[in-house]
Amino acid sequence: MSPEPTHPYYPPGVHIPAYAANEASVPVLLAALGGTLGITVLVAALIARKYNPRLDAKRLAVFCWFVMNACLHCGFEGYFVLNHTTVASSQTLPAQLWKEYALSDSRYLTSDFFMLSVESITVFIWGPLCLATALAIARGSPSRHALQIIACVAHLYGVALYYATSQCEAYFAGQSHSRPEFVYFWVYYVGFNLPWAVVPAFLLLDSVKTVTRVIRAFETGRFEDESGLEKKKTK
């Protein structure tokens, strides 16, 4: 008879050495993460509005989205990349958050090669790119749309790979890395990642429309400012 698992993760029997159960409750962990992100984004938004008073509500919301992404990618996911071998046994706030989320995807506690690869790219490339995009939006730089397009495509591709690899393994190998309970699969695994499929899709469409409109205006000699007012090209 095989020994009883010493952890709650799936698939049953997955090897997670030195696992230690979380000491903090889920509400405390979520409140700590939400509070930290909320304060950081709020402070960044106030600074951005002071730096650029012409920043409207729409662009400010997009700015906040990319600031939040930069924080999550470089901070939270950066912790995982640098400490993936000790997350299971650690009681730091980021480690406990990862252990809670890993109930929906145990690959984060097994030093899975795919997770390490995609998260390393996210930390060292997409995180700084999100920060650069946020700064470009705050400055009103024309480069913001180019940066936004790259960041959005990266997020969409990353989410597609994340879902595809785990679901292919579940379908073809019969191994699910998520516990079957509703909260872990539908809330954690699907719900927590879904914004990175929905929001980037809308932002990508918005930037593509803007770039297309500007190129068309340049070619025809008629321009529109961001308020939609038409201007003639001056020679």
Image (cartoon, grey):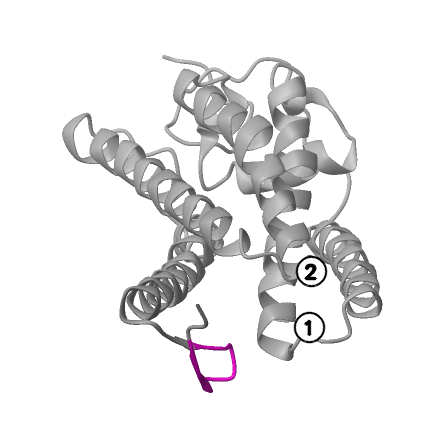
Q: Quadrant of the N terminus?
A: top left
Q: In this view, does 124 lie above or below 126?
A: above
Kindly indicate the quadrant of the structure image that contains residue 231.
bottom left
| Mark 1: secondary structure | loop
Residue that sits furthest to the front in the current view:
235
Which one is nearer the viewer's eye here, 197 or 229?
A: 229
Judging depth in this view, the residue of 188 and 157 nearest the camera is 157
Residue at which label 2 appears: 138
The stretch in magenta equals: 224-232
Is 23 on the left or on the right of 151, as rendered? right
Residue at which label 1 appears? 55
Where in the figure is residue 76, as x and y percent of width and height? Answer: 67, 37
Contact between labelled residues 1 and 2, with CB atoms less than 8 Å apart: yes
Q: Is residue 65 magenta?
A: no
Residue occupying the point 50% across, 47% down: 147
Mark 1 Cα-neighbour bin, 10 Å: few <14, some 14–19, many ≥20: some
Is 211 situated above or below 107? Answer: below
Residue closest to the eye, 35 or 101: 35
Give how far across and how far down residue 93 sits, in percent.
Answer: 77, 38
Q: Position of residue 161 (x, y in %)?
A: 31, 36
Q: Which callout, 2 or 1, points at the residue further toward the start of the chain?
A: 1
Tell me, yes or no, if residue 22 can be seen here.
no
Whether residue 229 appears in magenta in the rendering, the answer is yes
Q: What residue type is labelled 1?
A: Leu
160 horizontally vs 89: left or right: left
What is the CA distance from the residue labelled 2 to the residue labelled 1? 7 Å
Residue 146, visible in the rendered structure: yes
Amino acid carrying label 2: it is Ala
Element type at mark 2 = helix
Q: What residue is drawn where x is 60% and y is 41%?
A: 100
Image quarter where the C terminus lies is bottom left
